[in-house]
Image (cartoon, helix red, strand yellow):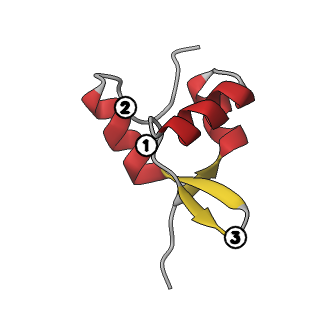
Amino acid sequence: MVQVDRPLTYTIREVSSLLRIGRNSTYDAARAGWLPTIRIGRRILVPRIALEQMLAKAGVASGFRTAD
């Protein structure tokens, strides 16, 4: 069994929170293909690895932590 510290996938709501954008904007990005997604049934999920790679290409540090 695989143990992970972080989830393998995020929901659209989680991604919108991580990226600090609106939920509708996140759905729009997913529909347009700007956000890597997979569908399982009716659920739209964003693979963590694909999101991190996308952000790395854009020059954003991974880890999704802010210096509060």
Q: Which residue corresponds to the image point at 53% horizontal and 20% vertical from the top-left?
A: 66
Instruction: Report the front residue among 5 and 14.
Output: 14
Query: Reading the chain from its start, which is encountered first: label 2 or label 3?
Result: 3
- At which x and y percent is residue 28? 62, 32
Q: Residue furthest front?
A: 32
Question: Quick check: 47 above or below 27?
Answer: below
Question: Quick check: 19 above or below 68?
Answer: below
Query: Reading the chain from its start, which is encountered first: label 3 or label 1?
Result: 3
Q: What label does residue 55 carry, if any?
A: 2
Q: Which residue corresponds to the image point at 71% horizontal and 23% vertical from the top-left?
A: 22
**Local secondary structure at mark 2:** helix
Q: Residue furthest bottom?
A: 1
Question: Quick check: 51 above or below 49?
Answer: above
- At which x and y percent is residue 16? 65, 31
* Amino acid type at image mark 1: Leu
Q: Which residue is mark 1?
A: 51
Q: Which residue is mark 3?
A: 41
Q: Which residue corresponds to the image point at 28% horizontal and 22% vertical from the top-left?
A: 59
Q: Residue furthest top?
A: 68
Q: How many discs appear?
A: 3
Task: Classify the position of the C terminus by image quarter.
Answer: top right
Q: Which residue corresponds to the image point at 57% horizontal and 40% vertical from the top-left?
A: 31
* Disc 2 to disc 3, C-alpha distance: 26 Å
